[in-house]
Amino acid sequence: MHRKMTITLDEAVYEGLYRTVGRRKMSQFIEDLVRPHVVDTLLDDGYRAMAADKAREVEAIEWCNALAGDMADAAR
């Protein structure tokens, strides 16, 4: 959900923003700049780091496959 907000900027800042990102993209540009400072992203960053660790991902896939194999062999 998006909320509308009115902010006041120096005219030179507004003009620079307008020239750099364009009128219809200002809100998204500002949101992208502000988000890391106000939204807790530590968990997301941790998941990204784990996914980037290729050796860990290979080990996790092997573990999952072994677990699935154990479940297939289990008596019902």
Image (cartoon, rainbow, N blue to C red):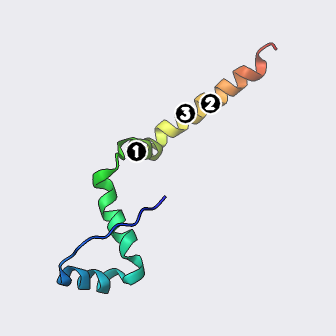
Q: Secondary structure at mark 1?
A: helix
Q: Secondary structure at mark 3?
A: helix
Q: Nearer the viewer, residue 38 or 76?
A: 38
Looking at the rendered structure, the kind of residue marked 3 is: Ala
Label disc, if present, on residue 49 of the rendered structure: 1
Residue at 23%, 73% in the rendered image: 8
Residue denoted by label 2: 64
Which one is in front in this view, the residue at disc 3 or the one at disc 1? 1
Neighbourhood count class around disc 1 (C-alpha, 10 Å): few under 14, some 14–19, many 20 upward: few
Residue extending farthest top: 75
Q: Is residue 30 left or right of residue 73?
A: left
Q: Secondary structure at mark 2?
A: helix
The x, y position of residue 5, in whole percent, is 35, 66
Residue at 80%, 13% in the rendered image: 75
Q: Quadrant of residue 58?
A: top right
The x, y position of residue 72, in whole percent, is 77, 23
Residue denoted by label 3: 60
Q: Are marks 3 and 1 in contact (CB under 8 Å)?
A: no
47, above or below 3, in the image: above
Q: Which quadrant of the rendered structure holds the C terminus?
A: top right
Q: Is residue 57 left or right of residue 43?
A: right
Looking at the rendered structure, the kind of residue marked 2 is: Cys
Residue at 44%, 41% in the rendered image: 50
Looking at the rendered structure, the kind of residue marked 1 is: Ala
